[in-house]
Image (cartoon, rainbow, N blue to C red):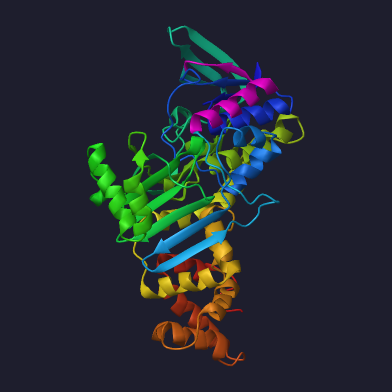
Amino acid sequence: MYDVIVVGARISGASTAMLLARAGYRVLLLDRARFPGGKGAATNLVHPPGILRLKRWGLLDEVAATGCPPIHSYGLQSGPVQLMAKLPAVEGVAEAYSPERAKLDEILLEAAVKAGAELREQVALRELLTDAQGTVIGVRAETEDRTPLVEHARLVVGADGSNSTVARLVGAQKYDSHPVLNKSHWSYWADLPHDGKVRTYRHRHRHAFTWPTHDGLTIVGVALPVADFKASPDQERDATVIAAFEDVDPEFAARLRATRRVDTWMTGAVPNFLRHCHGPGWALVGDAGYTRDPITAAGITDSLRGAELLVAAVEPALSGDRDLAAALADYARRRDALVGGHFRYTRDHAEIGDYNREELEFIRAMARSPHHGSGMVGMFATIVPPAEFYSPANIHALFDHIPPGSEPGWKIRMVRWLVRGAPRHLPPATRLADRLIAANLGSMGTFLLDSPAAGAV
């Protein structure tokens, strides 16, 4: 009898198993694969909240030693507007890393086994065992040679990806579900300079991206709306990706032509959804419970945060200090509160809409304000909640960084007067300003209007 059976032994599963085993629980970790093996189609980036977890768990030095440099700044460019800002710190951690995915998997899995988790590879889940009340009490699985495997546990955790078998077997329903919004090409490039920066570009409904990763390599790629995406030979993809950079950063495009791609192109696309992530005797973690578009490169970070959140919720129940059902319900509430804003932000970002004149003026102002610039890239990196960044107080302060004169356009000038020039004893003027700002911020303007403080500044 195990305390917990974890199905899926990659990022979220290995992290969950490691933390539970370190807390003294008997953990069985199952996976269909044999390790090391497989090549994860991931862009590898781990934002500071994920790096913070690796540091807490004593694994950051191992990750850094794999040959990936620290990344300290993120940037966005659209046409002539450029923003590059330092990442805000999370409990003293202000760096991202982009380690080789297979090596990160290996580090976490070895840490789980070292902590005492029992790993069984090449095991496929076939059925969940339940008692008379419908509570999950174990698993029925098969080894690669079809040998039956039956094990019991107080809790079964599905960490088996967006197409989770555990989720299917328990009938976990999706909600806030949205289709694939874009598709990406990316690959590894050699001989590009490593300057510790993530660069993203938005222009003509294309989202190009690049950052340093492991072994002196650089990730280079582009996300395109589904209708514009074409599966094509590698040489044609070279031209597509380089053209996306050439529109906004011809100097970088010239570097791509002068250097070399050292791997095949990979392709990625995922739907966006949250799943009900718990029930009697079971829970879901990582992509099994929540998947968002990879355009913000947050999948690994979300998996690390999710594992910690689940273990913090269930550990008191496993120790007998709390009811397990209540602990799992609390985990679900905390999970949705943690990811909801960034899920919505990512979904908006994934539509790859071109910025209008007013949005570009706001981004230009953010580039002039270290506070706002850091907040903007911190939002992309899952550090700053979108509702906090788009709060009335923060957006109103941004107008201090928009220069006087006619350059910003009449809409911005009018709203700036309502925010900064109208008499303070006329709160309706501020409320009108918030509505006008929101109307010109694209769909993200709804964060401003949804803020409980809207119109109160």
Q: How many marks?
A: 0
Quadrant of the image for the N terminus?
top right
Q: Quadrant of residue 371?
A: bottom right
Please give left or right for residue 188 compared with residue 333 in the image. left
- Would you place residue 50 above or below residue 412 in this image? above
Give 60 or 309, whichever is nearer the viewer.
Answer: 60
- Would you place residue 6 above or below residue 243 in this image? above
Q: Position of residue 215 (x, y in %)?
A: 50, 35
Please give left or right for residue 132 compared with residue 261 in the image. right
Task: Kindly tell me whether residue 133 is visible in this rendering.
Answer: no
Give 279 or 306, whichever is nearer the viewer.
Answer: 306
Q: Main secondary structure of the magenta part?
A: helix
Give the residue at x 62% y 91%. 425
Give 71 or 359, whichever is nearer the viewer.
Answer: 71
Q: Is 33 included in the stretch rendered in magenta? A: no
Q: Position of residue 114 (x, y in %)?
A: 67, 21
Q: Position of residue 322 (x, y in %)?
A: 73, 36
Residue furthest to the right in view is 321
Quadrant of the image for the C terminus?
bottom right
Give the residue at x 46% y 21%. 37
Please give left or right for residue 74 compared with residue 152 in the image. left
Q: Is 109 included in the stretch rendered in magenta? A: yes
Magenta-colored span: 101-123
- Would you place residue 157 above or below residue 338 in this image? above
Q: Position of residue 323 (x, y in %)?
A: 70, 35
Task: Kindly tell me whether residue 140 is visible in this rendering.
Answer: yes
